[in-house]
Amino acid sequence: MSVVVPVIMSGGAGTRLWPLSREMYPKQLLPLVEERTMLQATVGRLQGVEGLAAPLVVCNEEHRFLVAEQLRKVENPAGAILLEPMGRNTAPAVAVAALQALTQGGDPLLLVLAADHVIVDEEAFRQVVAAALPAAEEGKIITFGIVPTAAEIGYGYIRADRDNEIQGGGAAVAAFVEKPDLKTAEKYVDSGDYYWNSGMFLFRASRYLEELGRFAPEILKSCRRAFGDAVCDLDFVRLDEEAFAACPSDSIDYAVMEKTDAAAVFPLAAGWSDVGSWSALWEVGEKDASGNVVQGDVCDIDVKNSYLYSSDRLLAAVGVENLVVVESADAILVAHKDHVQQVKAVVERLKGQQRSEAVVHRRAYRPWGSYECIDREERFQVKRITVNPGASLSLQLHHHRAEHWIVVSGTARITCGEESFVLSENQSTYIPLGVMHRLENPGILPLEMIEVQSGSYLGEDDIVRFDDKYGR
């Protein structure tokens, strides 16, 4: 049996799940359904797949440290993290992953998964993957079709060719169908020949590249250039920006699956959802006796069939139904469940107004930890800073601000000019404007600090780095 290399696509923005999902911290990096993040859950459900290798992750360059840290926490580091300079859809992303997989020896099978899907019955998922492996070994380009539970108009459909069945429970693909209207979707479901298009695939690496070369040669050519000129940086593979920018943008479905005669579909009934909206999260969530999904510090009275999520403060709801109410540190969403698809329009309006809430959370994440702005006026800013054990910020200076640091808990090693010293709880220091400095956590517990900045300009771009272990 061939080695199976999971290829996890982690490039989406998840704007329909705002305000929790933001451009710089999208839904796949959030624990929306369970304690694990969606990325961690995707990796976790693979345990038990025969011949499994370390996953390859394709993600936005801005998310690279978050992805690496989340995989480290589940003790399943990636075989490589491929960084896209810009989004070019799934066909190019899988192509560079296939090229990477082939450098690791042999001609492995690629199990292509999205990082932001929910699968309730993980054992059923693993069984279907195992059943499809022999067909993939023989050269089939396999997609997993979700057995529909309703006449859904938000998904594309796959029609199976019942006269051309494949050992293991699959069938040849007769057609890919765009999102239908409700009446057509009902006919599809009643026929039993149609499945939801999940966007999950299984095929041999060389086989995918062969078919991509037949049907979308410009994509393959650009991907070979981008991968050939890639630069390895820590655990990351940085694709060549110029070559990747020249690559046509297309999905696997359009570039390969709708054109190849090797496409096969294996049905999957495992409680799947692509979690494309807050109402979808309500559907998959654990409901109370009133049909509510409740997470966080919530007090609800006479509330029915609603989704209530609190991340920072007490959320109280009284006498409402069919609502989505989501509270975060800097924004609150209130929407009727039937209108949650319009959340994307909220994000677009915020971007048009150049509001930071469309892109970032109040808490910003860095490879060394995180910081959160807790107060700000014209010439000062107060931040709460968390530095992970063993981590350090870059050796840097600021031209326009000075900083006061107060250790709340943990131990800090400070470099300030020519001096180096250690601070513990309730101790503080002052970093003058223009002085080179570094903050480190030499301990085994997180370092929590309060930073007070003062100066004429407090932007994050007022940083001159001299040394940085993270290569920024």
Image (spheres, grey):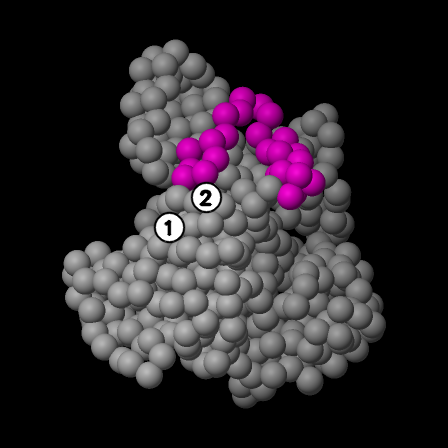
Magenta stretch in the rendered image: 327-354
Task: Answer above or below: position of 239 versus 341.
Answer: below
The residue at which mark 2 appears reads as: 377
Q: Amino acid at mark 2?
A: Glu
Q: Which residue is mark 1?
A: 382
Query: Horizontal and vertical percent for residue 123?
Result: 39, 54
Q: Which mark, by number, is residue 17?
A: none
User: At numbered mark 2, what does the secondary structure look like: helix, strand or loop?
Assistant: loop
Identify which residue is drawn at 63% across, 38% down.
Answer: 350
Tell me if residue 381 can be seen. Answer: yes
Question: Is 257 rendered above or below residue 95?
Answer: above
* Residue at the outermost left position: 425
Q: Quadrant of residue 441?
A: bottom left
Q: Is 380 left, or right, of 225 in this rendering? A: left
In the image, 354: left or right of 392? right
Residue nearest the viewer, comparing 90 with 109: 90
Amino acid at the residue labelled 1: Val
Q: In the image, is residue 196 above or below residue 203?
A: above
Single out the mark in the foreground, 2 or 1: 2
> Where in the figure is residue 122, as x and y percent of width and height?
40, 53
As measured in the structure, the alpha-carbon distance from the residue carrying label 2 to the one carrying label 1 is: 9 Å
Location of residue 63 in the rendering, given as x and y in whole percent from the top left corner: 52, 62
Q: Is residue 16 left or right of residue 282?
A: right
In the image, 240 versus 165, the foreground residue is: 240
Residue 132 visible in this rendered orientation of the protein: no
Q: Residues within 10 Å of mark 1 (few under 14, many from 20)?
A: some
Q: Total of numbered circles in the picture?
A: 2
Residue found at x 32% / y 60%: 404
Q: Position of residue 430 (x, y in %)?
A: 31, 65
